Image (cartoon, rainbow, N blue to C red):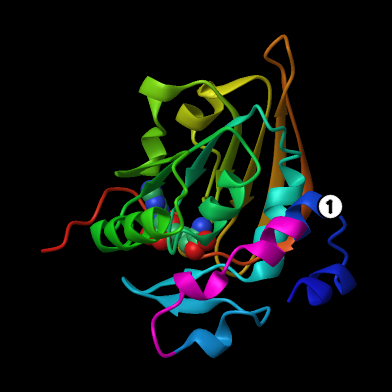
Amino acid sequence: MVKDLMSKGIKEVKVLQVMLDLPRHFFIEIGFEEWAYKDQAFSIPSEQTISRPFTVALQTSLLELKDSDTVLEIGTGSGYQCAVLSRLVNRVYTIERHDTLFKLSNQIFQELSLFNIRNYHGDGYAGLPLKAPFNKIIVTAGANDIPDSLLDQLALGGRMVIPIGDEENQEMLVINKDMEGNITQHSAGKCEFVPFLQGKVGILD
Ligand code: SAH
């Protein structure tokens, strides 16, 4: 899988090393483990998908992480992207709107002893004001626009990576906030994510 990512242009050695070490099959349902190390998205419960490894590697590389960073992820899903982040930075907060996925991913984080992750069941539109600001923010669902709450919670000198647009036409935006609070953005190319939806979903919904 990692050789495949390198052939597709992923260069950041630290990211590749973490993806080599971390068992992706933990995040895929029992019986489908053979799919875990192919560069493909795959269905997970609650009609969501685990992002393809290339997308995880790309978003992670675009964040330009430092060991000391505190990161906020919106859209925990399977938990794989979060687990990759947790091996690269000091602390990761992650929010998932589906209770089922929140609970499943929590179990995997415990099994893999990823103790620097704090995960929440909630609506990522609001971010996590109590723990802000974040050096880096990563959104792993496609939004129509950049939520103001997330821009506000980005630290000075911080960076956010967020897919913007509908399912037909999405672009990966890289947003930088400088030390004076000025915002600039550029596109890192086309992408494809499940939609960023408002509200949280409980087990009985
Ligand atoms: N990072 C995930 C990708 C999962 S797909 C992984 O590595 O597997 C995107 C996830 O975003 C889905 O689980 C979806 O339920 C979640 N999501 C969508 N809108 C959300 C919102 N407003 N708040 C929190 N999670 C959201």
In percent of width and height, residue 58 lies at 74, 57
* Residue 55 visible from this viewpoint: no
At 55% across and 39% down in the image, what residue appears?
Answer: 146
Give the residues drawn in magenta, as a range.
17-31
Please give left or right for residue 9 compared with residue 19 in the image: right
The kind of secondary structure the magenta stretch mainly shows is helix
Residue 18 forms part of the magenta stretch: yes
Confirm or reject: label 1 Cβ below 8 Å from ligand 1: no
At 60% across and 63% down in the image, what residue appears?
Answer: 22
In percent of width and height, residue 154 lies at 57, 25
Which quadrant of the figure has residue 84? bottom right
Quadrant for ligand 1?
bottom left
* Residue 184 visible from this viewpoint: yes
In percent of width and height, residue 145 lies at 54, 43
Which quadrant of the figure has residue 193? bottom right
Which quadrant of the figure has residue 66? top right
Of the pair 192 and 30, the residue shown nearer to us? 30
Residue 151 forms part of the magenta stretch: no
Of the pair 171 and 8, the residue shown nearer to us? 8
Of the pair 101 and 150, the residue shown nearer to us? 101
